[in-house]
Image: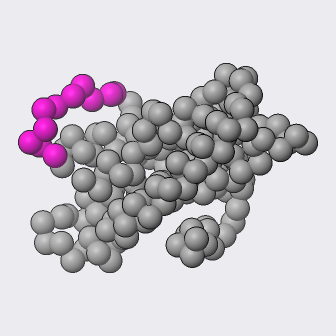
């Protein structure tokens, strides 16, 4: 399912960010492997993201406009977060650079909010799966707001990074 592709798993880049947030300094090999794994997922994520474009979704008669907007919001959240993570992590391992733990904590929060929103949307869409406990107080707006705040501080040209990611 497309939503699961957008989900940040606990063992990937999220675990690296949590290590950094806790004050640990990951080894160069750990950073390198985390970035390789993160970047190797790009083609799979791009396919999922293309499937969640507004123009693609609006052609589906079984999806109402509210659902389209929610799915589009998840798509944009994933794009924004991947770009922000790449910007944060690419300098790790360089001797003159140290991670900004405040930014890392904000990224972790944004990832967790996006993941919670994905879980809630999937629970509604995938009714065949056994329901899990829904978390109260988690909304798409909180995931998107955190991402937007981070994006506003990092860049004012969101379209360039999408095109850049597709080119790589």
Picture residue at 33% right of the left edge, 28% below the top: 135
**How did the renderer colour the structure?**
one colour
**Residue 59 as seen in the image, left or right of residue 42:** left
**Residue 37 as seen in the image, left or right of residue 25:** left
The answer to whether residue 139 of the structure is visible from this angle is: no
Magenta region, residue range: 126-136
Residues 60 and 162: in front is 162
Q: Against 135, is 50 above or below?
A: below
On-image quarter of the C terminus: bottom right
**Residue 37 as seen in the image, left or right of residue 125:** right
Rendered location of residue 22, percent (x, y)? 67, 22
Residue occupying the far right of the picture: 96
**Residue 139 as seen in the image, left or right of residue 86:** left
Residue 115 magenta-drawn? Answer: no
Rendered location of residue 154, percent (x, y)? 71, 56
Residue occupying the far front of the picture: 29
Residues 24 and 133: in front is 24
């Amino acid at each position: 399912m497309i939503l699961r592709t957008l989900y940040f798993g606990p063992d990937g880049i999220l675990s690296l960010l949590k290590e950094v947030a806790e004050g640990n300094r990951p080894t160069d090999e750990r950073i390198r492997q985390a970035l390789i794994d993160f970047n190797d997922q790009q083609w799979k994520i791009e396919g999922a993201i293309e499937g969640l474009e507004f123009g693609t979704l609006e052609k589906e008669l079984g999806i109402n406009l509210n659902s389209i907007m929610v799915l589009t919001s998840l798509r944009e959240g994933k794009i924004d977060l991947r770009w922000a993570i790449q910007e944060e992590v690419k300098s790790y391992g360089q001797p003159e650079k140290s991670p900004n733990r405040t930014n890392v904590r904000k990224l972790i929060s944004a990832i967790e909010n996006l993941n919670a929103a994905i879980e809630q949307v999937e629970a509604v869409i995938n009714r065949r799966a056994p329901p899990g406990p829904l978390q109260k107080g988690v909304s798409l707006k909180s995931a998107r707001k955190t991402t937007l705040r981070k994006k506003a501080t990092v860049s004012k040209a969101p379209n360039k990074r999408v095109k850049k990611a597709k080119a790589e």
